[in-house]
Amino acid sequence: MLYELYYAYGIGICYCYAYSREDALEILNDSFMKVFDHIGQYDPSRPFKPWFRRIIVNKAIDYYRRNLKKFPGEPLEEGTVEVYQAEGVDQLEMEDLKQLLDQLPELHRMVFNLYEIEGYAHDEIAGMLGVSVGTSRSYLARAKEKLRAKYKALYKDDYEQII
């Protein structure tokens, strides 16, 4: 019953972190297995969804680490990138954003999701991914920059109206 009740919720989160349906399903199934294995640790006086969401996000990070060689991306490095607000990207609908996020390198997308969608701080992201805080900030800035460029390329007329 739990699986059926929370399947749609869980798969929605998994799609934020996975490139394919198969990857999303693997993350979701691993998440449910952890829920079932650790259901005794769940505090019924608290909402289930936040506990489940945290498990899913952690499983997505585990999946990324386990498949690191599979995902092409930029090497981990310290860097400084100018951070500024991207007005056009902030106006995107979730469906449009998901389409654009799928075009980002895996680590950029992971940091973007953890920071912008999940609300983690850079020091938390750095700890989860095994990178420095500066690298986390750099990847977020690069992700936003790439999203902005892709948005401009796909929605040029809309972008000019926003600005």
Image (spheres, grey):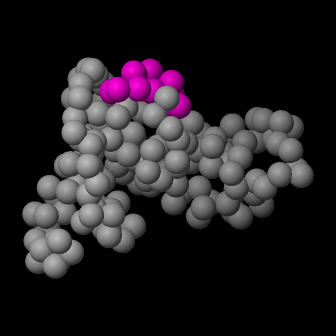
Q: Position of residue 71 (x, y in %)?
A: 29, 33
Horizontal and vertical percent position of residue 16:
43, 53
Residue 118 at least partly seen:
yes
Q: Can residue 23 be seen in this view?
A: no
Q: In which quarter of the image is the C terminus?
A: bottom left
Q: Which of 122 and 72 is in front in this view?
A: 122
Q: Position of residue 17 (x, y in %)?
A: 43, 47
Q: Tell me the chief SS of the magenta region.
A: helix
Q: In this view, does 26 lie above or below 125?
A: below
Image quadrant of residue 9?
Answer: bottom right
Is 54 positioned to the left or the right of 48 in the image?
A: left
Q: Position of residue 78 (x, y in %)?
A: 27, 21
Would residue 132 be counted in the magenta stretch?
yes
Residues drawn in magenta? 124-135
Is 132 placed left or right of 28 in the picture?
left
Count of numbered badges drawn on the protein: 0
Quarter of image, res 70: top left
Q: Would you place residue 11 above or below residue 96 in this image?
A: above
Asked whether, in this view, residue 34 is left or right of residue 158, the answer is right
Q: Which of 112 and 41 is in front in this view?
A: 112
Q: Residue at x 35, y 26 (%)?
A: 134
Query: Is residue 138 rendered magenta in the image?
Result: no
Q: In which quarter of the image is the N terminus?
A: bottom right
- Residue drawn at x 26%, y 57% is 86
| Residue 140, quarter of picture | top left
Please, is residue 31 above or below residue 64 in the view? below
Residue at 78% x, 35% y is: 38
**Residue 6 in the figure: left or right of residue 141:** right
Q: Name the residue at 39% across, 21% down.
A: 132
